[in-house]
Image (spheres, rainbow, N blue to C red):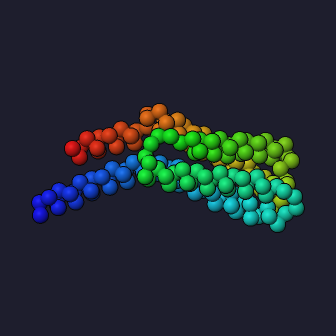
């Protein structure tokens, strides 16, 4: 009986550690979900327009799926390798910078045929916020890749407290 309780407590500790390790990447999952649905919505709106412009949000949508798969794998393999996440957010960042430049130059209408000229500020703000988010995520990727994030220190302290 005592052995079963010890075994159960050990399993609970292992599950807690696994969950905490997975939560190290929580911000990536939420931000990726935001970009996922934004790119999906943008792609659907462009499907009704003429031309192949829908391929840009479609490719970003596929990248978001790949990032999601990498993040889901972190539950079973909690390491600090975030190669697809890093590449995906670089792609999103480059896309946002190019679209911001095109919008400022006034040549972005094919990418936003559903937006009128009075709504240009909304697009500019959205792209700028997207750029800031991508930069912030890239910083987090670097910190985690180099084991310099605060969450890892908390995880190590929790792990030490269990023993």
Q: Between residues 156 and 118, which one lies in front from this camera angle?
A: 156
Tell me if residue 13 comes above or below residue 132 in the rendering.
below
Q: Is residue 147 left or right of residue 136?
A: left
Q: Please state if 31 lies on the left or on the right of 118 as rendered.
A: left
Q: Residue at x 11, y 60 (%)?
A: 2
Percent coordinates x, y for residue 72 in the rendering: 50, 54
Residue occupying image coordinates x 70% and y 48%: 127
For this rendering, which residue is in front, 113 or 7?
7
State the residue lying farthest toward the left. 2
Q: Residue at x 58, y 45 (%)?
A: 85
The N terminus is located in which quarter? bottom left
Q: Residue furthest bottom?
A: 48
Examine the image and state in which quarter residue 115 appears: bottom right
As drawn, 141 above or below 66:
above
The spot of residue 103 in percent (x, y) is 80, 47
- Return the residue nearer the eye: 154 or 133: 154
- Asked whether, in this view, residue 153 is left or right of residue 52, the answer is left
- Place residue 112 in its image quadrant: bottom right
């Amino acid at each position: 009986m005592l052995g079963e309780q010890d075994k159960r407590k050990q399993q609970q500790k292992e599950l807690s550690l696994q969950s905490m390790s997975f939560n190290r990447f929580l911000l990536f999952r939420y931000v990726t979900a935001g970009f996922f649905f934004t790119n999906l919505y943008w792609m659907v709106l462009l499907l009704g327009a003429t031309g192949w412009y829908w391929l840009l949000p479609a490719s970003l949508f596929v990248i978001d799926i790949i990032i999601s798969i990498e993040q889901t794998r972190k539950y079973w393999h909690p390491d600090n390798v975030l190669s697809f996440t890093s590449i995906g957010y670089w792609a999103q960042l480059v896309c946002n910078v190019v679209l911001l430049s095109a919008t400022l130059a006034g040549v972005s209408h094919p990418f936003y045929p559903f937006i009128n000229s009075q709504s240009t500020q909304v697009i500019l703000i959205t792209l700028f916020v997207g750029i800031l988010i991508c930069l912030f995520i890239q910083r987090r990727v670097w910190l985690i890749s180099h084991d310099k994030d605060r969450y890892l220190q908390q995880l190590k302290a929790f792990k030490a407290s269990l023993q």
